[in-house]
Image (cartoon, rainbow, N blue to C red):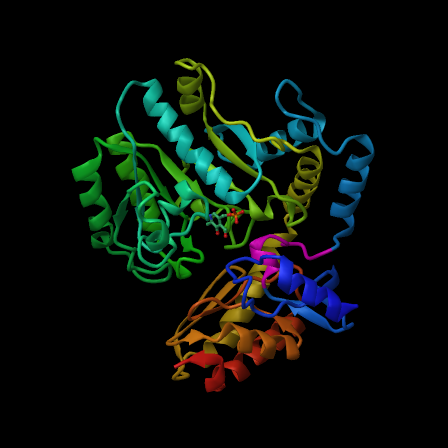
Amino acid sequence: MNKNNLYFNSKYIWHPYDSIVKPLPCYFVSSAKGVHITLQSGVQIIDGMSSWWSAIHGYNHKKLNQALKKQIDHMSHVMFGGFTHKPAISLCKRLLNILPKKLKRIFFCDSGSVSIEIAMKMALQYWKALKIKKNKFLTIRNGYHGDTLFAMSVCDPVNSMHNLYHNVIPKNLFSKQPQISFQEKWNICDIKSFNDNMMKFHHIIAAVILEPIVQGIGNMQFYHSEYLKNIRLICNIYNIPLIIDEIATGFGRTGKLFAFQYSNITPDILCIGKALTGGMLTLSAVITTQKISDIISNNYPYKFMHGPTFMGNPLACAVASKNISILQKGLWKQQVRCIEKYFINNLFLMKNHPRIKEIRVLGAIAVIECYHFVNLKLIQKFFVNHGVWIRPFKNIIYLTPPYIIKKYYLKKMIIAIKYAIQNNRFFIL
Ligand SMILES: Cc1ncc(COP(=O)(O)O)c(C=O)c1O
């Protein structure tokens, strides 16, 4: 049965970043609870990924399940055009409660990438409303903002899919990647490339967009909080909206509820997704200021031109509200701090290994940057055989476990990584 299903899967179902002709192996999951993922074979593995930054409270969470079950008996979905409902209103209230006061207007959407599209459209429509011609976006190298075409246009122009689609995606502006890391001493020179670009191109820049502090799957670097602070100042000088992409970092992952809080700034447009529903359903949101939303709404065509079918889905909103109420109890701070401490005390012992270029830790994120790319198929199999779910990319082995994880399980993951890095077979030399 399992074999048949895996065969069917490999023949007919396309998986992320994979070939349908020669796909990577897939592991058949039958259930997941807490930090454990149970495979069809009965084997349980420990989750080190939170399903790509989303399942922050672990799987099959009782309160999140209850929120969904309760909502499903009322209604699963109604269109958001012309209708509103309690789950959306409750979620908006909760979001406004935890966000800076300046961020007042919420637009719901379905996924992280789509929220980036919407944020960029908002910036474009804002300038159009002001009758000022600006249509470029300024960002930094090695960023990642999603896989849709407009989002790809602000991903790294070399280390992303840019090359494949270069003739169709819009051309945007890129500053050097920040060099000073989160823990290092700040040096104002780091902002020079960004500042130069801004001086030269501010007349055509519609908005600045970047991930706050942690550059995710670009190459998992953590830059200095002063860098973002300076970006905010420069955007203020040139009166250019700042879009912050908190899709990966939002909801506590870095040790702050939102990573931009390390820099004590407020964005003009904020994108959130992934952990918004505690990893239960797909939902994202774009939140902006009264100034931007009013300028868009008071000028032709007197409305914001976007409206996904599943906008404000009641099930997703209900579970997101519950997720935020769990976060508001505050336990996540202690959990993330414990994970960070464990990573610092145990991972850095490996830092002199000749395979390892650098180890970085921030909040519940650990990054082991190697000199060589991994052989994903082999290293993944090794990790599963060692009872852990870790999915590296390029030369990066990283951990973003659910906040509820216990030290014992972190230890198991670190031991598996220690063994893996000893083995040449798992790397493309
Ligand atoms: C920073 C960032 N922005 C945007 C996205 C895209 O989100 P989604 O995969 O939900 O479209 C991701 C996904 O990994 C991300 O990490």
Q: Residue at x 49, y 32 (%)?
A: 287
Residue 356, relative to residue 315: is it above or below? below
Residue 16, relative to residue 153: is it above or below? below
249 left or right of 166 in image: right
User: Do we see residue 28 in this rendering?
Assistant: no
Quarter of the image where one finds residue 158: bottom left
> Whole-percent x and y of residue 224?
34, 55
> Whole-percent x and y of residue 61?
74, 52
> Whole-percent x and y of residue 264?
41, 42
Outermost residue on the right side: it is 73
Quarter of the image where one finds residue 369: bottom left
User: Do we see residue 144 in this rendering?
Assistant: yes
Q: Residue at x 29, y 42 (%)?
A: 172
> Whole-percent x and y of residue 205?
27, 34
Count of picture labels: 0
Q: Residue at x 44, y 17 (%)?
A: 297
Front position in the image: 121 or 3: 3
Residue 367 magenta-drawn?
no
| The C terminus sits in image quarter | bottom left
Front position in the image: 103 or 375: 375
State the predominant SS element of the stretch in magenta: loop
Quarter of the image where one finds residue 85: top right
The magenta span reads 49-59
Residue 50 magenta-drawn?
yes
| The N terminus sits in image quarter | bottom right
Residue 368, relative to residue 180: is it above or below? below
